[in-house]
Image (spheres, helix red, strand yellow):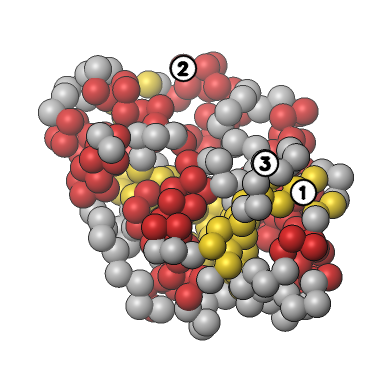
Amino acid sequence: MRIAITGSSGLIGSALVRSLRSDRHEVVRLVRREPSGPDEVRWDPQGGTVDTTRLAGVEAVVHLAGAGVGDHRWTDDYKRTIRDSRVRGTDTLARALASLGTPPRVLVSGSGITAYGDTGDRRVDESSPLGTGFLPSVCRDWEAAADPAREAGVRTAFARTGLVVSGRGGAWGRLFPLFKAGLGGRLGDGRQYWSFISLHDHIAALRHIIGTESVSGPVNLCAPEPLTNAEVTRAMGRVLRRPTVFAVPGPVLRAAVGEFATEILGSTRAVPRVLLDSGFTYTHPGIDEAIRAALAEERH
């Protein structure tokens, strides 16, 4: 297949590019600079332009671009950056795809399980209502921005991503050094649910969505059984063979990272009903396997 990807330099995007190319798919990377090769296409997500002439023949698009949620303190300006990078970028891409003489068959657009908000110990799946607050509102607008592509007949799925277990980047990439040094521990009271997924399974799930015609709409990309932060902490200590006696109280976390602490201490017990119902098989369904897989990735 010929597959276009935005956000191809990030943790998930770069892994997806490697996976697809290893199976001899043709990957076209959308970049915001001047293209440096035939496999790159220029786009300006904020300015609303895409070089559509070089998207001819693309059968699938995976849209992963967006400013990092935890990369900076949540000032009003950075919250605007988080929203605009997702909503404007998705709108720009969706309109460009809709304008093609032959649109792609499928668009897999990024989103997050943060769409559900803080659900406590209540399980939520793709049929559950969206939550309230900043990130749920971002997810709502982010997904709605893909409407032009959907209305043009492109099968559109929203990859509502959980916490990706990887030492190469993302939130977990920041945890590994602390736990390896014996400084890891629970966050807050540790009772908040973390819906995790290994990087390997995340990439496999994206490819499953691309290849499964029956899958559209929201898709939770997380392992079958979410765990509490305290359970994850114990697993990290168990696999890494390090103590996990340290804990970060909620007030300290709020002082350190500001409003984003609300998300870290919040609980989302999301389950992947759509993936399971459509026949997806996990390689690392449990947290121990996911952590070991991340450690193996670091060695390669």
Q: Residue at x 56, y 58 (%)?
A: 27
Asked whether the viewer can see residue 246, the reply is no
Q: Earlier in the sequence, mark 3 or mark 1?
A: 3
Examine the image and state in which quarter residue 153 appears: bottom right
Q: Residue at x 85, y 51 (%)?
A: 48
Residue identifier under label 3: 36
User: What kind of element bears circle 3?
Assistant: loop
Residue identifier under label 1: 43
Camera-side mark, 3 or 1: 3
- Packing grade of label 3 (10 A; few <14, some 14-19, many >=20) is few
Q: CA distance from mark 3 to mark 1?
A: 13 Å
As rendered, which of 65 and 264 lies closer to the eye?
Answer: 65
Q: Earlier in the sequence, mark 3 or mark 2?
A: 3
Camera-side mark, 3 or 2: 3
Examine the image and state in which quarter residue 20 appears: bottom left
Q: Residue at x 21, y 49 (%)?
A: 289
Q: Earlier in the sequence, mark 2 or mark 1?
A: 1
Q: Position of residue 258 (x, y in %)?
A: 59, 23
Asked whether the viewer can see residue 179, the reply is yes
Q: Quadrant of the C terminus?
A: top left
Q: Residue at x 44, y 64 (%)?
A: 24
Q: Amino acid at mark 1?
A: Trp
Q: Amino acid at mark 2?
A: Val
